[in-house]
Image (cartoon, rainbow, N blue to C red):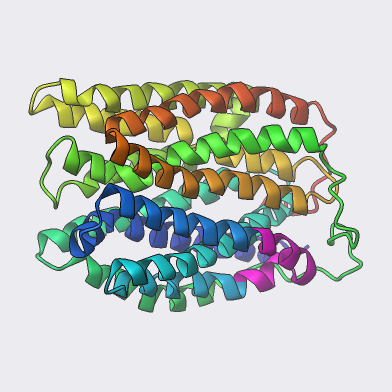
Amino acid sequence: MNKSVARRARQGVFGFFFLSGFVMGVWAAGLPSLNERLDLGPARLGTALLLISGGALVSMLAAGPLVDRWSSRRVCWVAGPLSAVVLLGPALAPSYGWLAVLAVVFGMGLGVVEVAMNAHSVEVERVYGRPIISAFHGTWSLGGATAGILTSLVLQLGVEGQALLVAAGIVVPFLYLPAALRLLPAPPADAEGAPEASGKVVGLRWGLIALLGLAAFAGHLSEGAAIDWAALHARWILGTDPAAAPLAYTVFAVAMTTVRLLGDPIRARLGSVRTIRLAGLLATLGYVLVLLSPLAGDGPRVVVAWTGWALAGVGLATVVPVIFSAVGAAGGPVGKALALVTAFGYSGMLVGPAVLGFVAESSSLPVALVIPAVLAAVVALAGSPSIRALTARPAPEPVAARDS
């Protein structure tokens, strides 16, 4: 494949990951404003997050066959802009009832674009013949961090958070178009690496897919807990100012962004197995600090919590890139396997925070955050043997553009 085509495709995938992260970041940073506007409380907010999860999981199950049939490029073309447009639903919801309905639609948009762009990222990495997926996920985190900073600035200027959500739902769909134009061309139906008509997963054993899915679920749930609850923890538990509360998520996102952008060299030096072990350890330590932060004094407790969120971000940064890259590098027709692992993972990100809402309502938010702290350790326990099994397999040959 022409090197310039590969480079353009890489730029396009960077664009998709940044914009997807930005949409998710705007949503996460705007949750405190949405909660106050509709007077939701932990239980109803948790229900809304659960409905988003349901919509996303349903659409993910459909996205795999769509990608296999029409190619990841074509699905990205539709799913990218649509995933931003549907943000207008929860942003403009006049009541909790409307929020519940529109949250499902928003989740469906998120689910399809996540599967499509991750499938395309695997295709681009295969073309390059060297690790590049971590940088894509770093760009996703960069989009989330940008959204968190922008939301904090908007709130400090006295503008309502709803206005930023609406603006994102209108502007971001148009920003997806130049990124979509740069994606890899769809392969012919009979080309090598094209989707198998049978739809069987022959590249990976089902047991290995399940173990990878468990590690992805644990990592995504721990990440999703930070995305949806870090700002609320700062506001409700630590008593920070409303304009400063989103910075808790921003600290997490900035730490994750930095490590993900450096993730490929880190994995090359340490190896995938040691990388995922270290990831689980650091993420667990980070959540322990967050849980202990209310015990510190009025000033230090914010610093302790931010340090915890930063360590959690550092630890969780390489989990998803390592797992997805391992699936893509396994060889054979792994498209369906990637979709299944993606669905496992994002079910953790989307279902987990909702479950935490119910636990927080019945007990407290600190008690709820014990769940992601435990699952951060599961990342290492489930990820190590599955990644070790994959690294023992013969690596597939790169397609082209190794030196690009």
Residue 310 appears in which quarter of the rendering? top left
Q: Residue at x 85, y 47 (%)?
A: 332
Q: Please name whichever residue, 4 or 106, is drawn nearer the observer in this view of the structure.
A: 106
Indicate whether 338 appears above or below 281.
below
Report whether 282 appears left or right of 123.
left
Q: Residue at x 79, y 40 (%)?
A: 330
Indicate whether 8 appears above or below 375.
below
Residue 325 appears in which quarter of the rendering? top right
Q: Position of residue 92 (x, y in %)?
A: 30, 75
Q: Please name whichever residue, 274 or 218, is drawn nearer the observer in this view of the structure.
A: 218
Indicate whether 24 appears above or below 89.
above
Q: Can residue 24 be found in the magenta stretch?
A: no
Q: Position of residue 234 (x, y in %)?
A: 20, 40
Q: Position of residue 259 (x, y in %)?
A: 44, 37
Q: Residue at x 10, y 64 (%)?
A: 157
Report whether 152 appears left or right of 68.
left
Image quadrant holding the N terminus, namely: bottom right
Q: Residue at x 28, y 48 (%)?
A: 42
Q: Is residue 224 visible?
A: no
Q: Please name whichever residue, 290 or 173, is drawn nearer the observer in this view of the structure.
A: 290
Q: Can residue 66 be found in the magenta stretch?
A: yes
Q: Position of residue 265 (x, y in %)?
A: 56, 34
Magenta region? 61-76
